[in-house]
């Protein structure tokens, strides 16, 4: 079972050094807007680039996308690979509606 965080909860922990925010949207989507200091690996590249996340294995990786569905898939993939992972419900759409370009 994948843990789901609200955008408010993610906002409160986004600067925590034990948390990694992972944007799994396309590069075009990310270029429009992204959460500051988040990592970027598009969902369709995640399994091929999983080794890039090995150095964060002891941290919780909170995935986000546009609306929360691709990030749920990403969090599931990471969980199967023994990462501590979670999903941000509502995605960047919800984030932007609450916080703007924070």
Image: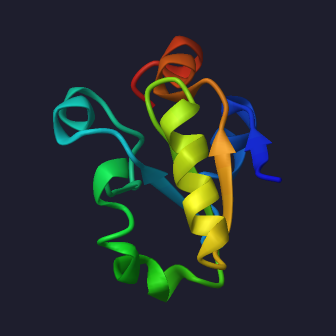
Residue 48 visible in this rendered orientation of the protein: yes
Give coordinates of residue 53: x percent, y percent.
Answer: 43, 77
Give coordinates of residue 34: x percent, y percent.
Answer: 35, 37
97 relative position to 44: left or right: right
Q: Is residue 33 above or below residue 96?
A: below
Which residue: 25% across, 30% down? 29
Which residue: 66% across, 62% down? 85
The residue lying furthest to the top in this view is 97
- Name the image quarter holding residue 35: top left
**What colour scheme was applied to this rendering of the protein?**
rainbow
76 relative position to 43: left or right: right
Which residue: 76% across, 51% down? 2
Residue 42 visible in this rendered orientation of the protein: no
Quadrant the C terminus occupies: top left
Q: Is residue 80 above or below residue 77?
A: below
Q: Is residue 94 above or below residue 39?
A: above
Q: How many marks?
A: 0
89 relative position to 101: left or right: right
50 relative position to 9: left or right: left
Q: For this rendering, which residue is in front, 69 or 12?
A: 69
Which residue: 68% across, 53% down? 86
Give coordinates of residue 73: x percent, y percent.
Answer: 56, 46
């Amino acid at each position: 079972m994948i843990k789901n965080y609200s955008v408010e909860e993610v906002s409160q922990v986004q600067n925590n050094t034990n948390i990694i925010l992972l944007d799994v949207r396309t590069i075009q989507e990310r270029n429009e807007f992204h959460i500051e200091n988040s990592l970027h690996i598009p969902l369709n590249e995640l399994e091929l680039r999983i080794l890039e996340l090995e150095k964060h294995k002891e941290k919780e990786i909170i995935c986000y996308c546009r609306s929360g569905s691709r990030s749920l898939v990403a969090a599931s993939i990471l969980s199967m690979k023994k990462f501590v992972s979670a999903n941000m419900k509502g995605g960047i759409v919800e984030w932007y509606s609450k916080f703007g370009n924070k």
